Image (cartoon, rainbow, N blue to C red):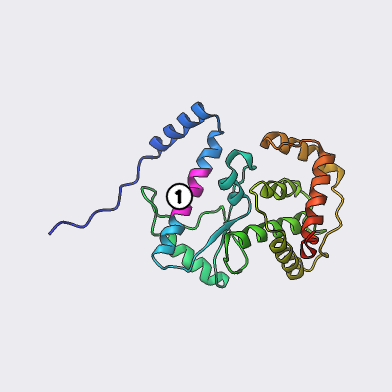
């Protein structure tokens, strides 16, 4: 009888650092950003393994990391990870801790990472539903009187999502109405003039991300049109 296979031994971190340095040198991305991507992808591998092993009934990523993994350098860099799991907070923390003990490939198992942030216990749903809810949450955050300060980045995230194509405006309207109703801070559709203090940041971010429009006034116009199309989707406009 053959002996059971042993789990792969963790690789020395120096080997990974050398590989990251080589990719950064040859292809141009920031080395620290590459390191963060590797961390996120390793954790995604843990989540995928945990789902396959039945530790929890599916999960999804949202927020900045979902944008970054989809758009790479076209999205802004982020340092935290938004994970959506079913169940109450205690159950999610317990299941996530169990998942982390599985480890992934040659990455060792570990404790709850400091960059993980938990979402509200909403259903996972389809990719379209997750995409629409992500946009709805960003739309609420960047127009809310309580959280709008410092959320200029969400305006570009919202516009970037549309470049995926085949965006479902009716589903986006439904998701937005639900998020605005749940959080009860202001009405949908929001009436929100972009603060003048955001304009330099919007232009700098747009240039950094290679966004086709870098003029703040035009970005604001596109953002307001985006809101109008979502709000009007029910009538087919």
Mark 1, residue position: 42
The residue sitting at 56% across, 39% down in the picture is: 33
Looking at the picture, how far across and down is residue 152, in whole percent?
76, 46
The residue sitting at 61% across, 63% down in the picture is: 119
Looking at the picture, how far across and down is residue 68, in whole percent?
59, 46
Looking at the picture, how far across and down is residue 17, in whole percent?
44, 35
Q: Is residue 211 above or below residue 27?
A: below
- The quadrant in which residue 88 appears is bottom right
Would you say 105 lies left or right of 225 here? left
- Quarter of the image where the C terminus is located: bottom right
On whether residue 40 falls in the magenta region, the answer is yes
Dominant SS type (magenta):
helix
Q: Is residue 63 above or below residue 182?
A: above
Q: Which residues are magenta?
A: 37-45
- Quarter of the image where the N terminus is located: bottom left
Q: Within 10 Å of the Cα at label 1, are there few (<14), some (14-19), or many (20+) other Cα atoms?
A: some
Would you say 98 lies left or right of 153 here? left
Viewer-proximal residue among 108 and 51:
51
């Amino acid at each position: 009888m053959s002996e059971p296979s042993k789990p792969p031994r963790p690789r020395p971190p120096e080997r990974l650092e050398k590989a990251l340095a080589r990719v950064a040198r040859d292809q141009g991305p920031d080395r620290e950003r590459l390191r963060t991507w590797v961390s996120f992808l390793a954790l995604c591998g843990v989540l995928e393994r945990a789902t396959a092993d039945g530790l929890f009934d599916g999960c999804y990523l949202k927020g900045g990391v979902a944008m970054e993994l989809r758009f790479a350098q076209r999205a802004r860099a982020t340092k935290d990870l938004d994970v959506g799991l079913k169940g109450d907070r205690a159950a999610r923390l317990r299941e996530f801790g169990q998942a982390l003990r599985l480890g992934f490939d040659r990455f060792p198992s570990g404790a709850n990472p400091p960059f993980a942030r938990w979402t509200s216990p909403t259903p996972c749903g389809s990719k379209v539903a997750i995409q629409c809810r992500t946009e709805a949450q960003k739309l609420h955050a960047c127009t809310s009187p309580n959280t709008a300060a410092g959320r200029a980045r969400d305006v570009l995230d919202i516009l970037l999502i549309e470049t995926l194509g085949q965006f479902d405006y009716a589903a986006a309207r439904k998701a937005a109405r639900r998020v605005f109703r749940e959080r009860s801070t202001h009405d949908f559709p929001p009436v929100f003039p972009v603060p003048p203090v955001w304009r330099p940041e919007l232009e700098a971010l747009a240039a950094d991300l290679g966004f086709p429009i870098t003029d703040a006034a035009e970005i604001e116009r596109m953002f307001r049109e985006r809101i109008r199309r979502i709000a009007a989707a029910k009538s087919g406009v």
